[in-house]
Amino acid sequence: MAQWSVRILIDAVPLLVRSAGIKSYLYYWIQHLTRLAGADTVRAEPPVESWEGLRHDRSIAGAWRTFRGLGGLALSNYTPLPVSDWLARRADVFHTCNLRARPPRRARTTATIHDMTCWLVPELHSAPNLRAERRFAEVLRRADAAIAVSQSTKDDAVRVLGLRPEKISVIHSGIPLAFFEIRAEDIGRVRRQYRLERPFVLFVGTIEPRKNLDTLLDAYELLPSSTREEFEMVIAGPVGWADPKTTARLSRVRYLGYLPEADVAPLTAAAAVFAFPSLYEGFGFPLAQALAAGVPAITSNVSSLPEVAGDAALLVDPRSTAELRDALSRLLLSPETRARLAARGRQRAESFRWEACAAASLRFFESVLS
């Protein structure tokens, strides 16, 4: 641990709010950074020792830490008080988040670019999201350096925001260990708990327009009735800013709602096919996790998803109901194809270990000061 000479402070405020991908990223990223470099090198605000288990539907810190963190963020963003400078007074590098409008002026500033979806498909986002991303773009322009979670995200950031390519390092996100080591008894438990008696197609993600759930449901409904009788459709994830017409359709399939984190890996492993036809992803955690769990996957041929999938998933035009239907039919009716993709998926997922992400990130932080 003594080899690391940089003092890094990670802005972990997104862990205090309802969030999905960014929250997962910070939760596991900070843990592995700290494990690799030590608590003297990597600190988080709020502090790591106050965390509870990962939950996406609420803060993972206690009430006092949550109040202090969100209150400090409000003071930082909406008053002239130098809150960020105070937080970073002992740090060499302050890794800011997309919720902070005024990072510190005295420490080097870095950030992670998770996606450019608010810029590329703004019609699929809420007004508060769009405002936050416009503000974050100004932070990125002033930052000393940035991490992009995929080459696709870096290319989009350079093209849309005009950021210098040399300023951005591509470091793929990781997959939690739970998806690589799933016990048969846990798979059986979630099957019983959620009454999953038939083989099923699984979608995991927030119910929002970008996830393209309506096209998936359309494709599933176009399958022959015999196929649908054999394989049911299972949807898991909280309702975000979805169209009411989309949420109404959930009653026609098995909708499980928000899942505790401990259930996501075994539920994923229990699926016959994983379908993730998102219109845009900066990385695509659900897809990467399905690959690690050895589940044959169908995903979109856009944004970062081909980069993550490699040759380990069927790629489709996400706006083509016919392509998605044909891919579902191909996998559901061919156990051999499913087995072949499952093996490729496990091999592909080895590229996305959190240990490798943390090691590359520490090298990135040292390069910021070199």
Image (cartoon, rainbow, N blue to C red):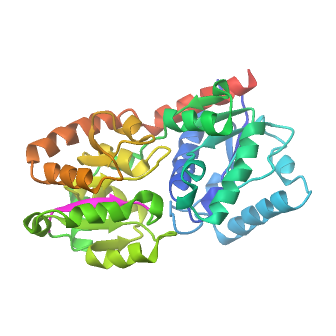
Residue 351 in the figure: left or right of residue 365:
left
Q: Which residue is at 69% across, 57% downward?
A: 132
Q: Residue at 70% of width from left, 64% of height from top?
A: 65
Q: Is residue 66 visible?
A: yes
Instruction: Tell me what residue is drawn at x 46 percent, y 71 percent.
Output: 239
Q: Is residue 188 above or below residue 296?
A: below
Q: Residue at x 70, y 45 (%)?
A: 137
Q: Looking at this view, is 95 or 296 the one in front?
A: 296
Where is residue 62 drawn, in percent x and y?
Answer: 64, 68
Q: Quadrant of residue 107?
A: top right
Q: Can you say which quadrant of the picture contains the N terminus?
A: top right
Q: Using residue 349 as the reference point, say whether residue 82 is left or right of it.
A: right
In the displayed image of the protein, which residue is found farthest to the top?
370
Between 294 and 242, which is closer to the camera in this rendering? Answer: 242
Instruction: Using the rendered image of the protein, determine whether residue 50 is visible from the camera's viewpoint.
Output: no
Position in image of residue 150 (x %, y %): 50, 36
Residue 319 or residue 81, whichever sits in front? 319
Which region shows up in magenta? Answer: 198-205
**Quadrant assignment for the C terminus:** top right
x and y, in percent, of residue 91 in the image: 78, 39
Image height check: is 146 above or below 24? above
Residue 157 occupies which quadrant of the picture?
Answer: top right
Q: Is residue 88 left or right of residue 60?
A: right
Asked whether 53 falls inside the magenta stretch, the response is: no
Chief SS of the magenta region = strand
